[in-house]
């Protein structure tokens, strides 16, 4: 009983100093990226073995803003690329400096608040995507919702010759 | 020192509670007549076995949330509860409260504001229902809580970090409607203090069942539940009055 009264006294003090206890859950990644996977004509994952450079590009008024997102990377089988806060973002894929494709992604921007301590972040809904087909074969939207869940959003198809497999 | 404090607390509780079983909650003092010991034991046993269904109503006011707010918290949470005592064992309860949050994070200038009533319904079980000689009881129970509310959330303009910050998006949403439902497990104590007045503590583990999210935000604070997370833990302190009917 003596212990019980001590516990009750402690609880009384605790009730004032710690009326509530919750855990803040900030996501580990506060940025949302578009995820592209490279696949062959059969849908199997492939890697581009030569050097690949990716430049992000947006139009702002009369000017164009370029940002090198990937610089001469090799063995690339997937891309994780940031979209802009405008309504369209272009990605220029330069294959070893010899050939290049342009992917244009149209998107709706969704400002998002998760937590007072975690800040805001920008999510996206892809409304359209098109590409040139110099090296790549086609582009498919697999998941139009781009958030911080790191799911695949696009498949980029390449036609691989049988002797190259 | 701890022994002295606990001894003093116990003495205080016992002193204050002695003779206070006449608080209109089923306990009453009676004039005892001289009866044979065996008959007396039988009468006592019968009295213990038979407990009328209705044992009274009590009104409770939770003040820990108010105390926390007065000490500088951004969150105000206070509630009243109406509790019935059935057979001194089952304690159905209805709780109505008001939750308010007006918080700014100085680090990122985000501002979240909401205020709304909330409701809970549930039942407790008096674990000490056989120990009627004690000046109070310990209980455990469940609650189902719900709240329908709207909130404002705003922050600094969002500048594009990847493409030269040329595109800037404002972030401000007002009157965003939401609702939430949750379950609570309760463990608490009630002690008589003076006449019909009691006090008590309860520990609550809350489990979120659902919360309506908006495309541009998720509620940060849910009135009655607390900060929006899968679960939360609360300590509550109640002032209680046993109604005289």
Image (cartoon, coloured by chain):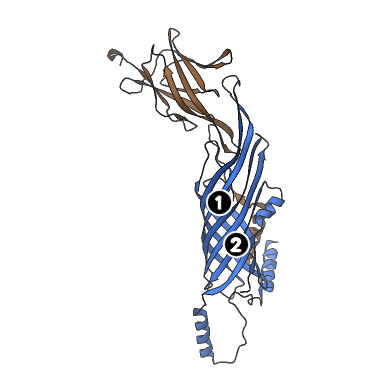
Colour in which chain A is drawn: brown
**Would you name the residue on which mark 1 appears?**
B147
Q: Secondary structure at mark 1?
A: strand
Percent position of residue A101, x then y: 43, 13
**Residue A159 lies in quadrant:** top left
Q: Is residue B84 above or below residue A57?
A: below
Identity of the residue drawn at 62% across and 66% down? B59
Q: Farthest left residue?
A: A162
Colour in which chain B is drawn: blue
Q: Is residue A63 above or below residue A153?
A: above
Kindly tell me whether residue A72 is visible in this rendering.
no
Percent position of residue A134, x then y: 39, 11
Which quadrant of the figure contains the C terminus of chain B? bottom right
Q: Nearer the viewer, residue B213 or A161?
A: B213
Chain for numbered disc 1: B
Nearer to us of marks 1 and 2 is: 1
**Would you name the residue on which mark 2 appears?**
B81
């Amino acid at each position: 009983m003596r212990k019980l009264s001590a516990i009750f006294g402690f609880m009384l003090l605790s009730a004032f100093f710690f009326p509530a206890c919750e855990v803040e859950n900030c996501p580990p990644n506060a940025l949302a990226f578009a995820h592209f996977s490279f696949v062959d004509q059969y849908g199997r994952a492939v890697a581009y073995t030569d050097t690949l450079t990716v430049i992000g590009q947006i139009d702002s008024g009369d000017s164009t803003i370029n940002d090198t997102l990937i610089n001469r990377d090799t063995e690339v089988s997937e891309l994780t690329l940031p979209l802009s806060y405008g309504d369209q973002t272009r990605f220029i894929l330069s294959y070893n400096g010899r050939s290049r494709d342009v992917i244009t992604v149209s998107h709706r921007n969704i400002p998002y608040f998760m937590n007072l301590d975690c800040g805001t972040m920008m999510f996206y809904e892809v409304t359209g995507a098109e590409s040139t087909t110099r090296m790549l074969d086609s582009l498919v939207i697999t998941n139009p919702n781009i958030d911080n869940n790191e799911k695949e959003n696009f498949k980029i198809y390449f036609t691989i010759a049988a002797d190259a497999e | 020192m701890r022994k002295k404090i606990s001894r003093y607390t116990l003495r205080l509780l016992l002193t204050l509670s002695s003779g206070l079983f006449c608080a209109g909650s089923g306990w009453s003092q009676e004039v005892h007549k001289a009866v044979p010991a065996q008959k007396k034991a039988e009468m006592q046993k019968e009295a213990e076995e038979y407990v009328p269904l209705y044992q009274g109503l009590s009104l409770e006011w939770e003040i820990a949330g108010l105390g926390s707010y007065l000490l500088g918290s951004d969150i105000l949470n206070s509630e009243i509860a109406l509790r019935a005592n059935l057979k001194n064992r089952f304690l159905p309860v209805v709780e109505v409260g008001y939750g308010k949050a007006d918080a700014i994070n100085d680090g990122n200038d985000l501002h979240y504001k909401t205020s709304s009533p909330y409701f809970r319904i549930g039942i407790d079980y008096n674990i000490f229902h056989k120990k009627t000689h004690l000046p109070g009881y310990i209980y455990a129970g469940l609650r189902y809580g719900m709240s329908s509310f709207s909130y404002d959330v705003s922050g600094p303009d969002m500048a594009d970090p990847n493409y030269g910050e040329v595109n800037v998006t404002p972030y401000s949403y007002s009157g965003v409607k939401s609702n939430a439902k949750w379950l609570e497990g309760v463990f608490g104590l009630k002690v008589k203090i003076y006449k019909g007045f009691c006090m008590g503590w309860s520990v609550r583990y809350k489990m979120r069942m659902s919360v309506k999210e908006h495309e541009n935000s998720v509620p940060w604070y849910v009135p009655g539940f607390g900060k929006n997370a899968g679960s939360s833990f609360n300590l509550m302190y109640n002032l209680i009055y046993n109604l005289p009917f």
